[in-house]
Image (cartoon, helix red, strand yellow):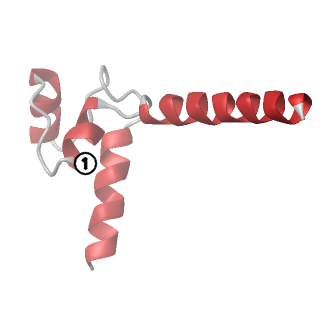
Amino acid sequence: MRAFRTLMVGVGTVAFLASTSLAAEQTCCQKAAAEAKECKHKCCVAAHRDGDSCAKCNPNKEDLKKKEVKKDTRK
């Protein structure tokens, strides 16, 4: 019984840590989009105005990928 309880505590801890790490991977633009808002960072506003992604906040262009998915689902 003690081994089972220890195993369950370990599984719960791993699940908690995994969920917090996944939530931390969102960029500022993705967080704003989740709230149906635009990102207010000056660097992001300037990049979005040009139709580009801010290299500082979104090095892998995560914000543009998120917008592409939204555009595709609306069609």
Q: Nearer the viewer, residue 31 or 1?
A: 1
Q: Nearer the viewer, residue 13 or 43?
A: 13
Q: Is residue 73 shown above or below 22? A: below
Q: Residue at x 12, y 25 (%)?
A: 41
* Residue where numbered disc 1 is placed: 34
Q: Residue at x 65, y 28 (%)?
A: 13
Q: Residue at x 66, y 34 (%)?
A: 12
In the rendering, at what x and y percent does residue 32 appear?
19, 40
Say what amino acid the circle numbered 1 marks. Ala
Most extreme residue toward the front, as rendered?
A: 1
In the rendering, at what x and y percent does residue 64 appear?
31, 46
Q: Count up the numbered dots.
A: 1
Q: Nearer the viewer, residue 17 or 43?
A: 17
- Considering the image in quadrants, where does the N terminus appear? top right
Left or right: 33, with 49 as reference point: right
Q: Is residue 64 shown above or below 16? A: below
Left or right: 46, with 1 as reference point: left
In the rendering, at what x and y percent does residue 16 appear?
57, 32
| Picture quadrant where residue 17 is located | top right
| Picture quadrant where residue 9 is located | top right
Q: Nearer the viewer, residue 59 or 50?
A: 59
Q: Residues within 10 Å of mark 1 (few under 14, many from 20)?
A: few
Q: Residue at x 33, y 58 (%)?
A: 68
- Considering the image in quadrants, where does the C terminus appear? bottom left
Most extreme residue toward the bottom, as rendered?
A: 75
| Picture quadrant where residue 63 is located | top left
Most extreme residue toward the top, as rendered?
A: 56
In the rendering, at what x and y percent does residue 4 appear?
86, 36
Mark 1: secondary structure: helix
